[in-house]
Every structure is written in structure tokens, then in C-alpha cells.
Image (cartoon, rainbow, N blue to C red):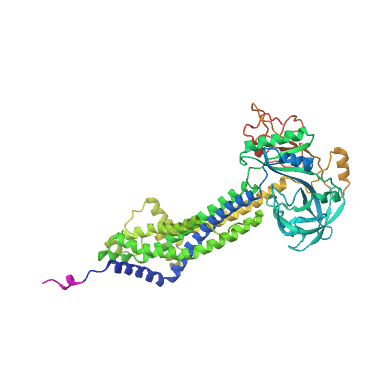
Amino acid sequence: MASSSNNRPPVSRWRVVALRWRKALRDLYQHRLRTLLSVLSIAIGVATFGMIMGTREIIQDDLAVAYNAIQPASAIIYGGPFDEALIESIRNMPEVALVNGRREIPVRVAVGNNNWNDMTLLALDAFDDQQVNMVRPQSGAWPPATNTMLVERQSLALFNLQQGKSAPLTLQLPSGHERTLMVTGTTHDMNQAPASIAGVGLGYITAETLPWLGYAQNYDQLHLRVAGDTTDLAHIEAVTAVVEHKLERGGYHLLRTDIPTPDTHFAADFIPAIILIFTVLGVLSLILSAFLIVNTMAAVMKQEVRQIGVLKAIGARTSDIMGLYLRMVLIFSVASLLLAVPLSVLGARLLSAFIADQLNFDLLSRFMSWRVFLLEIAAGFLVPILAALWPILGTARLTILDALTDTGTSRGTTAVSWVGTRVQTVGAWLLQPFSRPLRLTIRNTFRRRGRLALTLLTLMLGGGIFMGVMTLRASLFATLEDTLLARGMDVQVQLARPYRVPEIERTVWQVAGVTAVESWRFAPAVPVRPDAQASEGETMQVFGLPANTAVFTPDITSGRWLTATDQHAAVVHQMLLDKEPYLQVGDLLTI
């Protein structure tokens, strides 16, 4: 006669799976505080990672799109005076796609009582027909009426102005004369350094306002965009050379030519460094959350060693044990992602908006792409699971005997070396002055050396991230301070024409409070490359200054500084060596 046990219906596989999920959920509920801390640790790490990845994508994509929308100039030629007829003739050249003229006037603006702030006043040739480096209307009249002006939106705070309200500004011109212009609106100029960073405001007037300020109605800049490939630097240089040759044949005076990196915003030079720092911080936050998961799961597995022994005694396999506790980790991951995803979206929007405001451009989208979401979800599942595998696998592989006889101390017998014996002896001697409970606490701390190492590594990583951020902040401020100290001058005055050095310095010394004065000379120059075509490089500034200058402290990275006996010698910036790779210290430079 068959036993009654053989008549029992087989247990449904889905019922077994449901029991395992119930067990995982019950354990998490019984240890609610531990569960909450685990979920928060994963959520913070994943949210930080997602926020940084989202910000990286939003800034890089939107900055490029917004900058290309203003039709950035391929080259800017300084000189003049350039009139409308010349601009039209250049516009008709087949090599040139777009061109506009501008005049730039440095002025000072009265702010409050006896306070003056710097402003660059820009006269545009056609507000309604801008083609290159376009300035967009923000508020108020467009174009501004004659003898009125617009200001760039980030310049409002610099001059105590309010958005949407007209107000007069008193300008002091280079001639010393003063004019009062009514500010009738604001603009957005993405191609200029923001006033919040440069400390110089931006104002915009029509060409018809120039005579009232004492200037002829012409321009000193040509902003042009080449036809054809606008990203090909060699093509841009060739077209610019053709335009320069046309201007020189026409008798126009050329000061210099600037060729910016093709179709690339000036902030693109340092944005990758900022993004790299953010990315490293995001990865470190994930690693830190992984260490926290290792510690948490190690504690969970330690508490349930004997339960695991019982499960194995009734037939559970190692894979069954691992699946049981990996379910807990999956619940951690799902719960943390429910927190991390909205937090990362909000954080990416806020951080992107802050960076965009600092760089003075408008975000086209504040939402992360599906690629960032997939990356964040993958990190939210993979990092906790991979981190938890080690403590789960280590405990799940225990034999039934080891699990049932576990006492909470190190498993197995480990031979103690001569060094270990001496360390234990010294440690016991050092602990003698302390009370028995404290000695017991310290001994128990070092009894589980692996877990102690994990705890210390987690604390070290968290402290290292904090120290790294604070050190980076201090380094940035120190670098800025060193840069300012290298130019040890309080006031720099650029003169409209050359003066004799003794005459001008004698005049400056008559001003009360002056403790030092130096006269410099600078002029634009173009490096001539030693190739068969004797091609020209990008325009640079050449400064002539005393060898024993007291207001400039150079940071010499190779070679030496100038001496009073040097002739036909120069110290160049590293940027020139980067742009002209054929040059090395000791070579001849032809300009």
C-alpha cells in the first residue's frame, strides 16, 4: 500500500516562486530601517549618476544647436573704416556666404554716485537683416530708435536696470565726452562673453546713432561666414586671405584677423573638463553606493547563516539560496529607481539651467533622452546586483555543517603567523588600560577583518569624494588667484595713439596714489609658417614690455624669461605652440 505522502499533489512552481518573493518582502519589512537606508543609498548614487549624464547630454547638444542657429562667424577682420558699399561688395564675392559690419566702442557707464562700470557699445549695420553672429531681440523696441540703445540681458544687473523698464544711462566716451542714452529694451547675444563672467556690459545701437556720439557712420569689424564647408579651417583661412587681399588692394587698414574654432562656441574649450569632473563624481557616487550595498548584504547574510543551513538541510541548492536573496536586491533596485529617476530628471533640469544661464544661452530641451534613462536603469539594476553577489555567493556556498555551526566569528581555523602573534600581543598590551566592555568592543571590531575592511573602504571612499570636491574647489580659486597676481596691475589704460614713454609716464606719476607705472606696446602680428607656400597662421598679439617688469609675473614652463640684452627674442604662450606645432623653444619665429 502506498504511503500517504505519495498521494499529495505536486507543489506548483509558481507557488514556490511566490513563497520566495513573500519571504524576501517579509524580511525587508521586518528590517524597515535597514531597507530604507539601502534604498536611499542606491537611489542617491543612481540619481547623481543620471543627473550628471543627463546634464552632459543636454548641455552638449543644446549648446551646439543654439550656437549654430546664430550663424557664427568663420572669421572677424578688424580694421577699417568699412562702409556699406564695401560690405555689399564682399557679400557678392562667391567665396563669402554672409557678412555684416560692426563698430565696437569701449565706454564707461555711470552707476550710482561716482561709480563707473565698463561697457562695450556695439553698432550693428542692420538689426533687421543680421546674417552673422546674430543678436536676438529679448524685450522692448527692435531695432532701437536713433540715439537710444539696447543692453544685453545679462548686463541688466551690472547697471542696476530692470527687465521691461526703460531707463537712461550716462556714457563716458573715449574722448571724455558724456552722452545719455535711453535704454529701451534688451537683447540676447550668445557670441559675447556673459557680463556675469567678464564684468563688462554690452550695449547695442544703430549706425545712425554713431554721428551723435562723435563717430563716422562706418564700421571697424567685418564678421563673415564662408561659403562651402564652414568647419574646414584650411578653407576658412584661404577664403579669409582672399578677402584680406581685396581689402588691402582697396587701401583699407587691417589691424588683425580672428579665426575662431569653426562652428564651436568659446565655452566648448572648457565644457569637456567640467563634464569630465562631473562624470567622475557620478561614477564615484555609484561606486560608493555599491560599497554600501556590499556592507548591507554582508550584514543580512551574516544574520541568516543558520537559516541558510536549515534550507540546505531540507534540499535547497546554492542557486536557490542565491535567487532568494537576489530578490531582495531586485526589490532594492526597483524601489531606488522609483526615487532616482524623477530626482535625476529634476536635478538635470536645474543643473543644466544653471550652466546655461552662466554661459548665456537658452536650453532647447530640459528632458533627458531615452539613452540616459536606459543607462540609469541599467546602473540601478547592475550595480546593486554585482555588488551583492560577493556576500550572497560567499554565504550561499557554505556547507550545511558550516552554516549550522556558525558562531559569528571567522569560519575555519587560520594559522596565525609570527607577525600576527606579535601584533596580537602588542594589541592586548595596549588595551590593558581600558575597561573590559571597551576591550571586548575593540576585539569584536577586529574579529571580522573582511567586514571591517569593507566598512573602512566605504568611509574612505566617501571621505575621499568629499575631500576631492573641496580640494578641486580650492584649486580652482587658487589658480584664479595666481592668474590675477601674475598681472599685478590695478588699472590698465589703452591709448588711442602712441605717445612718448617719458611724457606719458610723467603725466601718470602726477596722479595721487600711483606707486608704479609701466609702458607697454602691443601690435597684431601673423606667424609665417616655414612651408613651401609660406602660409600664415592665426593673428596673435605681440607685446613689448620691460624685461624687468614689475607688474607681470610670467609662469615659465620651459626656456627662460627675457633679459635687457635680448634682441630678436620672444617668450610665447603655450597656446601658440599648440596652434603652430612646428615651433619649439629655441626655434626661429617669422611674423
- Please count the marks in the image: 0
Q: Nearer the viewer, residue 509 or 68?
A: 68
Q: Nearer the viewer, residue 65 or 268?
A: 65
Left or right: residue 291 versus residue 57 is left
Q: Nearer the viewer, residue 345 or 182?
A: 182
Question: Does residue 449 appear in the picture of this structure?
Answer: no
The residue shown at (63%, 38%) is: 233
Q: Is residue 538 above or below residue 153?
A: above
x, y percent for residue 261: 64, 42
Q: Quadrant of residue 84?
A: top right
Q: Is residue 144 above or below residue 314?
A: above
Q: Quadrant of residue 453?
A: bottom left
Q: Quadrant of the C terminus?
A: top right
x, y percent for residue 51: 54, 58
Q: Is residue 581 magenta?
A: no
Q: Nearer the viewer, residue 487 or 418?
A: 487
x, y percent for residue 347: 56, 61
Question: Does residue 334 appear in the picture of this structure?
Answer: yes
x, y percent for residue 554: 70, 41
Left or right: residue 291 versus residue 157 is left
Q: Quadrant of the N terminus?
A: bottom left
Q: Is residue 516 above or below residue 315?
A: above
List the single residue furthest toward the left: 1
* Residue span colored magenta: 1-8
List the single residue furthest toward the top: 532
